[in-house]
Amino acid sequence: MILSIAESARNPQNRLHVISRNGKWVVKKEGAKRVFGIYPTIGKAIEIATARVRSGKTEEAVVHDLFGRVAQKIV
Amino acid sequence: MSFDSNVFINCPFDKQYVPLLQPLLFTVLYLDLNPLISETRSSGQVRVEQIKKLIYKSKYSIHDISRSEGIKENELPRLNMPFEMGLDLGCQTYGKGKLAFKKCLVLEKTKYHYLKVISDIGGQDIEYHDNNPEVLIRKVRNWFTAVLNNHQPGPALIWEAFNEFIAQTNRRLTRESFSKDDIESLPFSNYILLAKQWIASHKR
């Protein structure tokens, strides 16, 4: 069981990224081709990503800044 | 790597430019091309000799002249990038054989800024990136699509792949006991190696 939780944490499908896109913000599952959603503000995108993490549907969310750097992690 | 896939990158290597240089290198690698930068060479040689060799070995060049002005007010302009661009254009103009087929993209900060500082380069392929990595990726990707005359992955896909690469590489290096300072001051040759590995296993 412990191993499976550790494996789950490494599963890229279980991680979200909040990324800028042409003035808007997308929430995207790691490794996925399509985005989960497109939002007008970073605040709204973080709200959606946080809700996914809090509900246990996602292990963590990585919020990127405008240069692609890691600005914040939501776990 | 061969002449046909080598891309000479002429840009500053200071801390302020790293947030643009990293996506630039990543994009070139994502398009299956090979970036050559002077930083990757040993410091034993005279720098300009290294640069001349890199120019000679590369069919393509990207010259970012957006930082040719001083960073702070009253600071002297930095002329290395325009100088190296001149070497490259000279190589293309006077070189023989394959050198005549060299192509270059000039990047600047804002549209038509070059007209004020180096108007003689009018007629080259000149694009501006607005200090925005998303714009830079789009301009570089679109330029290579035109000069290579083949379809390439879309700009949004490359940008999102870059974001995932940064997060995963930070995680990997942290696991390998790299400190935050170690990660931020990673040599570009090391960065290129990591990006190549990541792209080889993740590119769709």
Image (tube, helix red, strand yellow):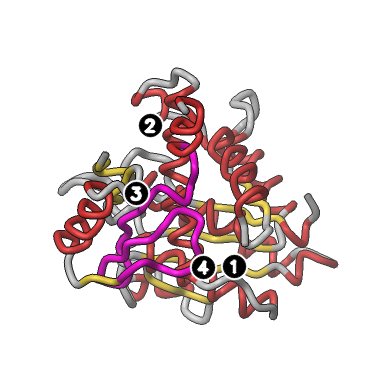
Which of the numbered marks, if any, corresponds to residue B184?
Answer: 2
Query: Marks 3 and 2: which is nearer the front?
Result: 3
Q: Chain of mark 1?
A: B
Q: Amino acid at mark 4?
A: Val
| Part of the protein shown in magenta | A10-37
Residue ID for mark 3: A58
> Mark 3: which amino acid?
Thr
Q: Is A26 included in the stretch rendered in magenta? A: yes
Q: Chain of mark 3?
A: A
Disc 4/disc 1 C-alpha distance (Å): 11 Å
Q: Nearer the viewer, mark 2 or mark 1?
A: 2
Left-right relation of B153 to A30: right
Q: From the viewer's perspective, is the residue at label 2 or at label 4 nearer? A: 2
Disc 2 from disc 4: Cα separation: 24 Å
Residue A49, above or below A4? below
Q: Which mark is residue B104?
A: 1
Q: Which residue is mark 4?
A: B140
Furthest toward the front, the residue is: A1
Distance from disc 3 to disc 2, alpha carbons, whole Å, reads: 28 Å
- Looking at the rendered structure, the secondary structure element under dot 1 is strand
